[in-house]
C-alpha cells in the first residue's frame, strides 16, 4: 500500500504535491503509528513525518466550508481566579466556552510528570545535536518539505528564542503527538476544530526558555492571518516562579490590539504594507496596552506544574513571563493546531 501511495504522490525529491487520497494516507499513518507504538523505529518515524506532510498538504487544498462552532458553558474560575478544568470534564464545546468567556482553559496535571520529564530530556538532546552537528540519529535533522512548499524560514530566530521545531526531530515529533493522544487531548482538539486537524512545521516548537527579560506581548492572530486555531501549551517543567512561565491577560479579547506602539519593542520596525509579510517580530504590543486590556484583572503569572496544559486561540494576549534572576530554564511544548479549512498562509502543513 505504501508503494502505491508513493506512486500517487511522487517520489521523495520529486514534486510531492500530495495528489493522493487523504483517507488512504490517514489509514497508512494509523498503521505505522500502531506499529511504532509496539516497537520504536526511526525509519518509521521519518516516514510518518513525510506522510503527515503529504496528507496535510492534501487536506488544506480541499475546498471545505468551516464547520459550525459548538459552545458549552464553561463555568466560573477557581479560588485563584484561573479558568481551571478537569481533563475528564472537557470536550471541544466546553473548551470553546472557556476561551470565549475567560480567554483560555488551564488543565492541571494533564500529562504524567514522568512523561514530560522524558520529553524535556529529549529537548536537551536535540539542542546538543543541533549545536554539535552530531548526536543520535533522528533526534535533530532538519525537515525538508515537498513542493510547492519552500524551505523552512526563521530557524535562526527559533534557535535564538530557545526553541527547536518539532518537525526537525522525527523522534520527538512522534513522542509529542503520542503524549497528546494518551492524555485525550487530540480528541478534544478535533472536537474543538470540528474538522481534520493539522499542525504546521513553523508553529510547533519544543522550548527551553532560559531566564532573562520578559518576552514581547503579542496575539498570534496579528501575524497568522484569518485562521481556525487552537494552541496547546504544555509545561514540561515546573515554571512561573523559579523558571520562566507565562504572563497573560485572563480575559477574552475579541479584537486585535494595536501593535508597534511606544514601549512594545517593535516601535522602530515598520509594519509591512503587504499583510503576507507581517511576522511575529513586527507585531508586538506594549506592556501598557496589555495592562489596559486586563482592566481590573490586570496581568497574571500563574505557577505551573510539569504536565499542566493551557489551551487558547489566536486572540489570547500573552508573553513569556521571565526574570533574569530565575535560576532554572523552562521546558515546554508550544503547538498550534489548525482546522484544515483555516490553515494559515505561508505555513507548511502536517496532518495529525
Image (cartoon, rainbow, N blue to C red):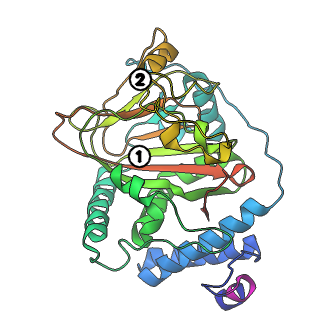
x, y percent for residue 55: 68, 69
Determine which of the numbered discs, if any, sits on residue 24 in the image: none
Question: Gap in Å between the C-alphas at discs 2 and 1?
Answer: 29 Å
Q: Secondary structure at mark 1?
A: strand
| Residue 228 in view here | no
Compare residues 312 and 116 and report the one nearer the observer: 312
Assign the C terminus to one quadrant of the image: bottom right
Q: Secondary structure at mark 2?
A: loop
What are the residue bounds of the magenta stretch? 6-10
x, y percent for residue 51: 61, 75
> Residue at coordinates 62% horizontally, 26% vertically from top-left?
100
> Residue at coordinates 70% horizontally, 32% vertically from top-left?
71
Q: Is residue 168 above or below residue 271?
A: below
Residue 214 sits in quarter: top left
Which mark is nearer the camera, 2 or 1? 2
Compare residues 91 and 219 and report the one nearer the observer: 219
- The residue most toward the top is 296
Q: Is residue 231 above or below residue 297?
A: below
Determine which of the numbered discs, if any, sits on residue 263 in the image: 2
Residue 175 sits in quarter: bottom left
x, y percent for residue 331: 31, 49
| Residue 102 in view here | yes
Compare residues 334 and 212 and report the one nearer the observer: 212
First in residue order: circle 2 vs circle 1 = 1
> Residue at coordinates 24% horizontally, 45% vertically from top-left?
329
Dot 2, crowdedness within 10 Å: few (<14), some or many (≥20)? Answer: some
Assess whether residue 167 is covered by the magenta stretch: no
Amino acid at each position: 500500500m505504501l508503494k502505491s501511495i508513493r506512486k500517487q504522490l511522487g517520489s521523495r525529491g520529486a514534486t510531492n504535491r500530495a495528489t493522493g487520497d487523504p483517507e488512504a494516507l490517514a489509514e497508512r499513518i494509523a498503521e505505522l503509528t500502531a506499529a511504532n507504538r509496539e516497537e520504536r523505529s526511526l525509519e518509521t518515524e521519518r516516514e510518518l513525518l513525510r506522510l503527515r506532510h503529504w496528507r496535510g498538504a492534501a487536506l488544506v487544498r480541499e475546498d471545505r466550508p468551516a464547520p459550525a462552532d459548538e459552545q458549552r458553558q464553561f463555568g466560573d474560575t477557581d479560588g485563584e481566579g484561573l479558568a481551571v478544568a478537569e481533563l475528564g470534564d472537557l470536550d471541544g464545546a466546553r473548551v470553546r466556552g472557556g476561551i470565549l468567556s475567560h480567554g483560555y482553559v488551564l488543565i492541571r496535571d494533564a500529562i504524567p510528570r514522568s512523561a514530560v520529564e522524558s520529553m524535556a530530556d529529549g529537548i536537551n538532546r536535540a539542542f546538543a545535536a543541533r549545536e554539535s552537528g552530531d548526536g543520535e540519529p533522528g533526534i535533530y535533522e532538519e525537515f525538508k518539505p515537498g513542493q510547492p512548499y519552500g524551505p523552512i524560514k526563521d530557524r535562526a530566530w527559533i534557535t535564538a528564542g530557545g526553541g527547536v521545531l518539532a518537525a526537525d526531530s522525527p523522534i520527538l515529533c512522534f513522542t509529542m503527538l503520542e503524549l497528546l493522544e494518551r492524555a485525550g487531548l487530540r480528541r478534544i482538539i478535533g472536537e474543538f476544530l470540528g474538522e481534520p486537524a493539522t499542525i504546521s512545521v513553523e508553529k510547533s516548537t519544543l522550548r527551553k526558555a532560559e531566564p532573562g527579560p520578559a518576552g514581547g506581548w503579542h496575539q498570534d492572530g496579528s501575524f497568522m492571518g484569518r485562521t481556525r486555531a487552537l494552541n496547546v501549551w504544555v509545561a514540561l517543567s515546573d515554571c512561573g516562579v523559579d523558571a520562566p512561565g507565562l504572563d497573560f491577560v485572563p480575559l477574552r479579547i475579541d479584537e486585535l490590539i494595536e501593535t508597534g506602539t511606544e514601549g512594545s519593542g517593535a516601535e522602530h520596525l515598520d509594519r509591512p504594507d503587504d499583510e503576507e509579510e507581517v511576522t511575529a517580530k513586527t507585531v508586538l504590543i506594549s506592556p501598557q496596552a496589555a495592562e489596559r486590556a486586563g482592566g481590573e484583572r490586570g496581568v497574571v503569572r500563574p505557577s505551573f506544574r510539569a504536565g499542566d496544559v493551557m489551551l487558547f486561540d489566536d486572540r489570547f494576549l500573552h508573553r513569556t513571563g521571565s526574570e533574569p534572576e530565575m535560576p532554572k530554564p523552562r521546558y515546554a511544548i508550544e503547538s498550534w493546531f489548525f482546522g484544515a479549512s483555516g490553515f494559515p498562509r505561508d505555513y507548511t502543513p502536517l496532518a495529525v
